[in-house]
Image: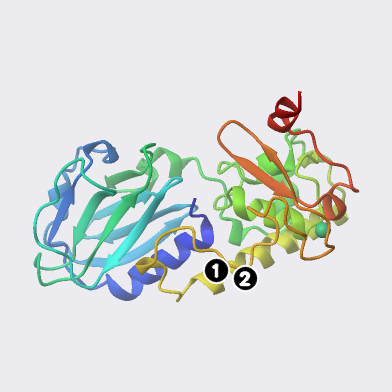
């Protein structure tokens, strides 16, 4: 799932390549991705793109008085093309959900919003105000704008587990499963630590880790031609998706806690004092 750094890279690409171009045509291949009906999607035709923006894990273009906003969800991506084919998309075929021609179709660049797999969760809105997208209206402050004091305030009194709390977009916007694993590993915190019970020292360490992990990932991602690559391109992960491999810091084996449809990873030696956290799926398999 693309998180803040990947979305930032895609938005950076749009700022450099899409701004200044007119929307030629928008093809909707999967009607279910479009969450708004008024204004109609063809209200964008002829409007010149004058900005690209990120809100947490949402990205969008501004053209005329309108914002075209997308949430890529788990398996979505934005794929840029210097010259898009002019033929209309065939509804329901292939991974392309929506195509935006920037100029006259057939002789102009543009991009596709794509979604792999069978679970269709990619969502697109056309609105005159980003706050009309319910998920954006509910976002907490952006992870890159949160100071150490802000973080302490956001977590104060929260009885949830730190892993769940920092991935709750209503608390802090932009962090998902992968980067939260990385942040907690750098901060040497258990994913199951109670958010509101961190010491002042732990809060400062967590904030430092949050800033360093995200800014490193942004600088690695931006300019990497993210928009011409498929998703899932992440380098430098220390624990996320590395179950069974050695921790790059201490050499202990990276462990996993799995749920019905997702899993997270951590290093016991670095994060939990060597304790292996209960994993319901593993214990079921061992019965
Ligand atoms: Zn370790």
Q: In the rendered view, does 223 fall on the left or right side of 79?
A: right
Circle on res. 184: none
Q: Name the spot of residue 100 as percent of width and height, x first.
A: 21, 58
Q: Is residue 39 above or below residue 244?
A: above
Q: Is residue 33 left or right of residue 28?
A: right
Q: How much space separates mark 1 and mark 2, taking CA atoms?
A: 6 Å
| Quadrant of image for the C terminus | top right
Callout 2: SS:
helix
Q: Position of residue 124 (x, y in %)?
A: 31, 45
**Badge 2 residue CB within 8 Å of ligand 1:** no
Labelled disc at residue 218: 1
What's the residue at 49%, 58% (across, down)? 232
Is 138 displayed left or right of 211 in the figure? Answer: left
Q: Which residue is painted at 77% across and 36% down in the image?
A: 157
Q: Position of residue 21 (x, y in %)?
A: 20, 71
> For mark 2, what is the residue?
216
Whether 210 is drawn above or below 258: the answer is below
- Packing grade of label 2 (10 A; few <14, some 14-19, many >=20) is few
Quadrant in the picture for residue 149: bottom right
Q: In the structure shown, which secondary structural element does the residue marked by tag 1 occupy?
A: helix
At x 76% / y 56%, what residue is drawn? 185
Q: How many tags in the picture?
A: 2
Q: Is residue 265 above or below residue 25?
A: above
| Left or right, residue 86 beside residue 54 | left
Q: In the displayed image of the protein, which residue is found farthest to the right? A: 273
Assess whether mark 2 and mark 1 are in contact (beta carbons under 8 angstroms). Answer: yes
Q: Residues within 10 Å of mark 1 (few under 14, many from 20)?
A: some
At which x and y percent is residue 87?
Answer: 8, 57
């Amino acid at each position: 799932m693309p998180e803040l750094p990947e979305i930032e890279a895609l938005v950076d690409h749009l700022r450099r390549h899409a701004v200044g171009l007119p929307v030629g045509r928008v093809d909707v291949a999967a009607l279910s991705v479009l969450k708004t009906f008024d204004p109609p999607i063809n209200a964008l035709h002829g409007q010149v793109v004058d900005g690209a923006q990120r809100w947490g894990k949402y990205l969008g273009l501004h053209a005329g008085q309108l914002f075209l906003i997308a949430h890529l969800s788990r398996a979505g991506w934005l794929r840029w093309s210097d010259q898009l084919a002019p033929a209309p998309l065939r509804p329901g075929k292939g991974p392309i959900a929506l195509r935006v021609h920037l100029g006259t179709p057939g002789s102009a660049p543009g991009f596709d919003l794509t979604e792999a797999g069978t679970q269709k969760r990619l969502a697109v809105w056309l609105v005159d105000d980003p706050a009309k997208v319910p998920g954006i209206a509910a976002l907490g402050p952006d992870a890159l704008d949160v100071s150490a004091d802000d973080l302490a305030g956001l977590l104060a009194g929260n009885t949830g587990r730190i892993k769940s709390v920092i991935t709750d977009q209503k608390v802090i916007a932009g962090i998902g499963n992968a980067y939260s694993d990385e942040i907690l590993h750098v901060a040497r915190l258990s994913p199951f630590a109670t958010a509101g019970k961190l010491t002042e020292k732990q809060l400062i360490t967590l904030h430092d880790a949050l800033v360093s992990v995200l800014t490193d990932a942004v600088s690695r991602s931006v300019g990497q031609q993210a928009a011409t690559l498929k998703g899932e391109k992440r380098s430098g992960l220390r624990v996320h998706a590395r179950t069974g491999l050695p921790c790059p810091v201490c050499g202990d084996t990276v462990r996993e806690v799995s749920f019905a449809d997702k899993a997270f990873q951590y290093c016991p030696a670095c994060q939990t004092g060597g304790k292996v956290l209960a994993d319901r799926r593993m214990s079921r398999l061992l019965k």
